[in-house]
Image: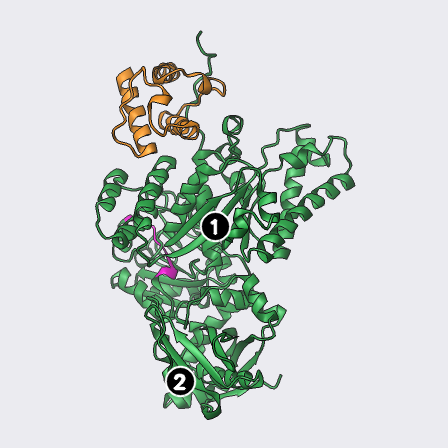
Amino acid sequence: MTDQAILDTLTRILRDLLGDDTIVLTAATTREEVPNWDSFAYVSFIVAVEMEFGVKFGVAEVESFPNVGAIVARLRALLG
Amino acid sequence: MTPPVTPPRAQAPRQPATLDALPVPADFRGELQAARALGDPATRLERLAQLANHRLGFLETIQLDRALAEAASADPGGLARVSVALLSASTVDHLVPAARVAGLRRRLLLDVRLGQYGQYRQELLDARSALHRAPPQLVVLSLHARDLLATLPLGAGAAEVEGAIDRHLEELRALWRRAREALGASVIQQTFLNWAEPAFGGYDRAVPAAPARVIGRLNDRLAEFAAADGVALLDVARASERDGLDAWFDRARWLQAKQEVAPPAAPAWGELLGRVVGAQRGLSRKCLVLDLDNTLWGGVIGDDGLEGIVLGEGSARGEAHLALQRWAKQMRDRGVILAVCSKNDPAIAEQAFREHPEMALRRDDVAVFLANWEDKAANLQRIATMLNIGLDSLVFVDDNPAERARIRGSLPMVAVPELPDDAGEYVARVAGAGYFEAVTFTAEDRERAEQYAANAAREVLLQSAESMDDFLRGLEMQVAFGPFRPVDLPRVTQLINKTNQFNTTTRRHSAEAVARFAADPATVTLQFRLADKCGDNGLVSVMILVPDGEAPGTLLVDTWVMSCRVFGRQLEHEAMNLAVEAARAAGAARLRAEYRPTPKNGVVRELYPSLGFRPGPAAPDGATAWELDLAGYVPHATHIRRSPD
């Protein structure tokens, strides 16, 4: 799976979760830049990503992703 | 710095099986968009309700809930609203969309309010809290066992542990009482997830204070307290035994967000709640309709013959079908009506029920047996008509995907479980769907199957009678009656909340409210039991007459319901004779009544004029109002004698 394909999937998940089709995620996007992407929605996002990709993030790393690109990189590693 | 390496899991945690009987949506996104584009909010809600009756995941549930909020904000009416306070000791925000979607699945609009996380005691006890300012109809308590475990050292003895558990539950019971008495709400209590790690291993069960054993005991005692207090359980502990704890509890989510129920289990949690709320409001299904070939047995009896069908001990496939039969028999024994709907020759099909030695179901277990070559949708409609119940009371089990799709398309109100390919999984799938969720098990439930058999005997009498009057006289009917006694309350509550047809106002009353009517000296309550020479129908009608605040000397018929099993037996006439006597004894000079129309209660539209009531003052919202002057009342002649006791 390419980074762009992962990014597209993350964009779709966040659009569905927040009901906002204007969202476009890039590797540099941070949570603060997306309206309504609060800590509650972030946990839900992580859950939906885990379910979509069939993976599980570590407890600590979920809090340490500095931006969307870090999530993409981690997914790439997990998916092997 | 690179993050610590977590080996990838083969797959995400297993999701609960709770929704497995619902069909997978063909194109969720497209159907949701199509529904949202509908202009009329009522039509939109109906389409969303149909979409809710699919197997939806975590994210789909959130999307549907958002569309529901848009449609419901226009307040289109048509769906009953239920106000719910969800009080918790953990984060539960992620469960709310699933609760509302499960409500929509039953055509209920759940108005869910959340308590402050961890503040459930204060909110219930403090009369100035937001909860008390706007009391909900329903209080749902979602708690966990951590506080209790923290008080118990591993060395605590059995008596100490039992004492701590009971004190913990007595405190909870005080909160239940507070919710019921101060708020007038019904209570649903979530069971405790047992996520405790082993302390000793298998020996945990022998050590009183081993955490896993404590939580197990806590749930056992909780069930006893809840049953004694009439509190319904939202049994996530039981579901987690079936699905595996990982499907319900995720340590990462507890650590990150204090979520006791894992978000992927949210749709299942909502569905379990919806089942209990539905059961409390009489929305559980009433009749299990079964296909025969490759459903109740393996093979096609018309082709393979009585000896050729696969059923019973000795073959795995035969035992699989037998397991479904045994479960159906159990449903019959708890009051679910059984029916057969099969494309078959009736003589050959019935022969299996009478003569096959391995059949668990016998012919007289089945109230309506339709084996013919007609369309199954037409047969299902006939079954509903013959049993005098709605299509939304039916569950239809058929192994054939084409038949299932056809019934879902033509009769969407019939529940049609999606069956797996393997017959070995049939019983778990159908039983796990929760169609017959109950919050009570009354004497009437136990006897219902016999009562339907007695109805068949009455049918024979009716056919041989010269006239309706002749038939009714020959039945030798007797009515027993009186005010509500404590022993009657569960059945009275059940009848008030389940009856849709003979129901003049369709006011639903909780067990608490019914007990208050019974205790109020100014209110006249009446329950009627009808027996005849074919059998006892049990408690089949209920009336509540409340003082009319605006007119002294007047009683208002708040509620009058009657079971559809005794329609057309003159009981409504004898019940009114008795109600008039009771009203006079209470000092009333006049009865007032209303007919509030619903899609289902057309059968009582003309009830009051037929009983001698005159039109009363105008009534709101399409209702009609009626009045009866007791002094001029002439009792109706009936063939019902009054029981000596």
Q: Is residue B104 visible?
A: yes
**How many residues crowd around disc 1 within 10 Å: few (fewer than 14), some, or many (20 or more)?**
many
Q: Quadrant of the N terminus of chain A?
A: top left
Q: Amino acid at mark 2?
A: Phe
Q: Quadrant of the C terminus of chain A?
A: top left
**Residue A60 at what x, y percent from top left?**
49, 18
* Tags 2 and 1 both on a single chain: yes
- Residue ID for mark 1: B84
Q: Amino acid at mark 1?
A: Val
Which type of secondary structure does the marked residue at label 2 adopt?
A: loop
**Residue B6 at what x, y percent from top left?**
47, 16
Where, by quadrant of the figure, is residue B396 drawn? bottom left
Label the orange chain with its letter. A
Q: CA distance from mark 2 to mark 1?
A: 38 Å
Check residue B613 in the rendering and tell me which mark sits there, or answer none.
2
**Viewer-closest of B331 and B191:** B191
Point out the stretch of residues depicted in magenta.
B392-401
Check residue B416 in the rendering and tell me which mark sits there, or answer none.
none
Rendered position, A46 above or below B80? above
Q: Quick one: label 2 or label 1, which is nearer the N terminus? A: 1
**How many residues crowd around disc 2 within 10 Å: few (fewer than 14), some, or many (20 or more)?**
some
Residue at figure coordinates x 43%, y 34% from the top left: B264
Rendered position, B336 above or below B164? below
Chain B image colour: green
Q: How many marks?
A: 2
Chain designation of label 2: B
**Residue B633 at what x, y percent from top left?**
46, 90
- Describe residue B251's horizontal placement relative to residue B270 as left or right: right
Residue at figure coordinates x 39%, y 83% from the top left: B462
- Describe residue B623's horizontal placement relative to residue B135 as left or right: left
